[in-house]
Amino acid sequence: MKRILIWSSVAVLVIGSGLAIARASDAGSWQGCFANHHGHFGPMSHIAHELNLNHAQERQIQSMWRAEKPTVLGLVRQFSAESKEMDAATAQGNVNESKVEEIASRQGTAIAKLLVEKEQFKARIYNTVLTPEQRAKADEMQTRWHERMDRWAGSSLNSPDAAHSRFR
């Protein structure tokens, strides 16, 4: 059961990120990922700002995303269908354990494929778009992210309210 909860949490994060990027790119331009319809900054704005991406780099990433998007959306659709199957397999509190395990296994595979696509996309951007200075900054940002996750996980394990209280 703990494994299902962990995979479900990872799935929500991965799918949420994929949907945000996909939705943003549907806005008609790559800027959709950097700013939404109301002019507020989107999920990529912080990273673009921190790395000081220029317009040429943004256009290059946009082109790369257009090529990647069909694969990512296919995996998101697959996961969404499996999520609906999971809802049906656990409807009204009736859990068909073998069916749930089978669906969870397929969801895990879809999540793994999404994570692989994400890492390959990040690597292509890192190796072909970013300057050496931007790569160093990206490495620093990644290190800070892992440190925050470690702190959050450590405080969550010690006290269920500790992590929550930091976000108030």
Image (cartoon, rainbow, N blue to C red):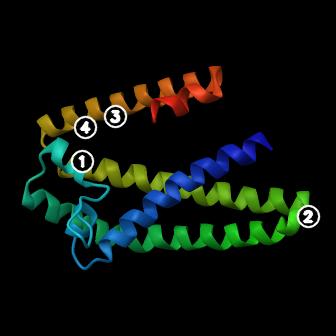
Disc 4 target residue: 138
Disc 3 target residue: 142
The answer to whether residue 145 is above or below residue 33 is: above
Mark 2–mark 3 distance (CA, rounded to whole Å): 42 Å
Crowding at label 1, few (<14), some or many (≥20) Cα neighbours within 10 Å? few
Query: From the viewer's perspective, is 137 left or right of 122?
Result: left
Q: Position of residue 140 (x, y in %)?
A: 26, 29
Mark 3–mark 4 distance (CA, rounded to whole Å): 6 Å
Mark 3–mark 1 distance (CA, rounded to whole Å): 13 Å
Disc 1 target residue: 46
Q: Residue at x 12, y 42 (%)?
A: 131
Query: From the viewer's perspective, is 23 left or right of 39?
Result: right
Task: Mark 4 or mark 2: name the one nearer the start of the chain.
Answer: 2
Contact (Cβ within 8 Å) of mark 3 with mark 1: no
Q: Position of residue 119 (x, y in %)?
A: 41, 49
Camera-nearest residue between 19 and 56: 19
* Amino acid at dot 2: Asn
Query: From the viewer's perspective, is 66 left or right of 55?
Result: right
Q: Which label was assigned to residue 94?
A: 2
Contact (Cβ within 8 Å) of mark 3 with mark 4: yes
- Closer to the observer: label 2 or label 3? 2
